Image (cartoon, grey):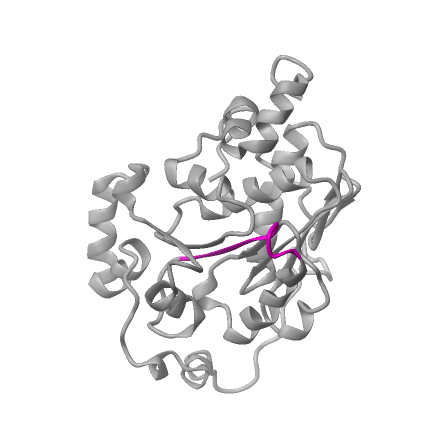
Amino acid sequence: MSAHGKPSELQIGAYRLSPSVWADRELKPRLGLDLDQWQRKLVSAPRGSRQCLLTYRQSGKSTAAAVAASHSMIFRPGSTSLAIAPSQRQSAEVARRARAILIATGQKLTVDNLFELGCNGSRLVALPGSSDDTVRGLSVDAELIIDEAARVDDEIYNACRPMIARHADKARLLVMSTAWLSSGFFHDIWTNGSEQDWQKTRVLPEDTGRIPPAFLDAERRALGDRAYDREYRCKFDSSDVNAFSWDRIDAAFDTEGPTPPLKPTYGEEDPVVARELAFADDPFRTRGSALR
């Protein structure tokens, strides 16, 4: 549905062909969502293309992925999309934003939980990239989204790629991340990936103008050049990978003696003070909220 009622057949045809037009006519008035130029380019990429996005923190990449997945769910009935990220929380963020879009555009959800959304015979599955065993078995014919790809293991990426083999001309592979180490599949794609296979896009803060320069100056002073360059300047860290090994990470969290048990709060036996269904608190359902 459009802001002025049910869209005409001509509008539906335009929306199906152009996700950016759909976003302007449907998502901007309903959700206050105004896509940047790079987001428009990503969500309107040709079917069957392979997209590699290197971007700064808080640029809106999860929002762009959610728009792409939502568009496929609505205008490609019966399709399957998959969002993979290092953790369930991160992959669920793409689903949460897609859910807000689907509800705002009047879709009836047939599946609505932390791991999957369903409508119009289509589905978006959100899984953690913790083990390649957990992601096998799906066939993806719409969007294969690998978010925070620089921190996803190579084994997960290798397990995901065959999911689009039967639909190579329809499925889009969206590999998106901020910079991390100078190793792994994402770094290899960005530095060595052939232009015949990949369309690469780099997004810096000045490309969008959404982050005030004064804030960036403060971030550089607070983080130091090395971390700042990773988070905001799309520069991979060329330091020794062993500096970030699991042994060192485990040692950093090692404590002497047993971990003390949780103590009840305010006389309650259960330290959890509130429980809600997944996605129950949805701040994006009101008009004017920005999905960023």
Percent coordinates x, y for residue 47 in the rendering: 56, 46
Residue 78 lies left or right of residue 191; in this view the side is right
Q: Is residue 173 magenta?
A: yes
Residue that lies at the very extreme toward the top in this rendered image = 4
> At x 35% / y 71%, what residue is drawn?
181
Which quarter of the image is occupied by the N terminus?
top right
Q: Quadrant of residue 210?
A: top left
Residue 112 lies left or right of residue 257; in this view the side is right
Q: How many marks?
A: 0
Percent coordinates x, y for residue 80 in the rendering: 69, 51
Q: Quadrant of residue 223?
A: bottom left
Q: Nearer the viewer, residue 109 or 258?
A: 109
> At x 61% / y 64%, what residue is drawn?
128
Residue 120 lies left or right of residue 142; in this view the side is right
Residue 47 visible in image: yes
Image height check: is 173 above or below 211? below
Q: Nearer the viewer, residue 137 or 208?
A: 137
Residue 251 lies left or right of residue 3; in this view the side is left
Image height check: is 10 above or below 170? above
Q: Is residue 49 magenta?
A: no
Residue 276 visible in image: no
> At x 67% / y 60%, what residue is drawn?
166
Percent coordinates x, y for residue 70 in the rendering: 62, 40
Q: Which residue range is magenta in the image?
A: 167-177
Percent coordinates x, y for residue 271 in the rendering: 67, 60
Q: Nearer the viewer, residue 180 or 260?
A: 180
